[in-house]
Amino acid sequence: MSFNRTRLLTRLALQDLWHDRIISFCIVSSLVAVIAPLLLLFGLRFGIVNQLQNDLANDPRNLEIRMLSSGSYDQSWLTQLQQRPDVGFAIGQTRSLNTLADLQTNSTHFIENAEVIPTGSGDPLLGKREIHQVNEVVITQEAARKLAASVGDSLTMRVSRLLDERREWGRISVTVVGVLPATYFNRAAIFTHPSLLLALEHFRDGYAVTELGAASGAQLNGKPSVYARARLYARDIDHVASLENDLRAQRIETTSRLADIENVKSINRVLGIIFNTIAATALIGCIASLIGSFIANVDRKRKHIAVLRLLGFTRPAVGTYVIIQGCLLSLMAYLGGFAIYLLASQVFNQALAGSQATGQMICRITPLHGLIALLLTIVVATLVAGIGALRAINIEPAQSLREV
């Protein structure tokens, strides 16, 4: 079919729809009544689930797998753990007693038994804050408040031990290179280079540790590093379950937020079933209504279609004419439904804005979703209009004009 013929058919279809604008409005309204609620329902489903999933993925605490029991793990075990494809971050930790130290900035600002946590490149908790030197630390917001410290300040870290019935103190001056907000860690703690944490353990175990100014005690002499547990984070929330199961298979007791992750996945599945059921029901009703509308419209215009045939329009041209009308009606219905969705979604977002912790939109669809919905609307309308086109093709001009 030539371009001129297609353009002529499109112009005729538009003029015909305008001439019968009341009937066209009724057909478009019936489509809008289906499209607008479906867009709104999908926007709510996508917005709610997407927000929950973003909250899970962006909160590093959901990726953490905490080892509850202490063991004795060498560097090779830790290296194998770090090289697993489902591990996002892993670093060795010493015994719990050796992860505490006193912090002090002056005589009036100090913290007793602050947590000392090892960190390294790629730590999910620290984000872009990295430690490169042994004497560099990142402190939590709570520790910064108690010490009245900020980035660039120097702290004194102090630990004690009882060696040969003598109380000895080890000290090291460290520099604050970052302050961790209380969003994910609200206790007084410092994040340090792992070698400094090992130095604290060696000092308490009675070894001479020059980093802490302790010359007395046994010599390390290349003592291999042994860890009691590991700080462990999965690569993403989908790998938490498999990683935790593998650790438990090694008789390592763990805990995680797997239940919260599974709850979000269950919500997604339930909302998916609800949406698909409602969408399928609405779609079946819409298709049935459209089939009846298009067939009734073709029967009502039998004489007009017969005249087109007498004017030289072929059967395919007449079928195309009916399909073009169906596509135009569906396009107008989609634009009307999308406009109603935009208004209704704003009402939802403003009404629920006060209960949102993240400030995200609770009802939204992406441009890609909008384009897919448009294509589906046109495809469904084209298929339904095809039934009316088949009926129009079978109209015989002579028989239809006998009543004139």
Image (spheres, rainbow, N blue to C red):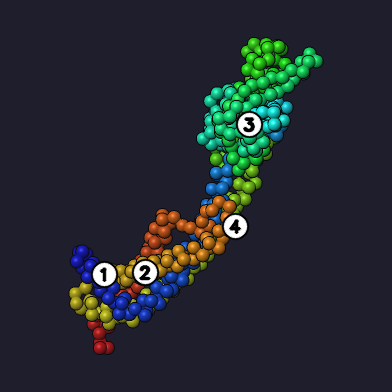
> Which element is circle 1 on?
helix
Q: Nearer the viewer, residue 92 or 236?
A: 92
Q: Earlier in the sequence, mark 2 or mark 3?
A: 3
Q: Is residue 278 above or below residue 194?
A: below
Residue placed at 51% from the left, 56% from the top? Answer: 361
Q: Secondary structure at mark 2?
A: helix
Report, in whole angstroms, how far the alpha carbon at label 4 lies from the one at label 3.
33 Å
Amino acid type for the residue under numbered disc 2: Met
Identity, as a three-letter code, of the amino acid under mark 3: Ile
Camera-near label (1 vs 2) is: 2
Depth order, front residue of 396/166: 166
Please tell me which residue is depicted at 69% across the width and 24% down the height of the picture.
158
Q: Which mark is residue 10?
A: 1
Q: Callout 2: 10 Å neighbours few (<14), some, many (20+)?
A: some
- Distance from disc 1 to disc 2, alpha carbons, whole Å, reads 14 Å
Which SS class for mark 4? helix
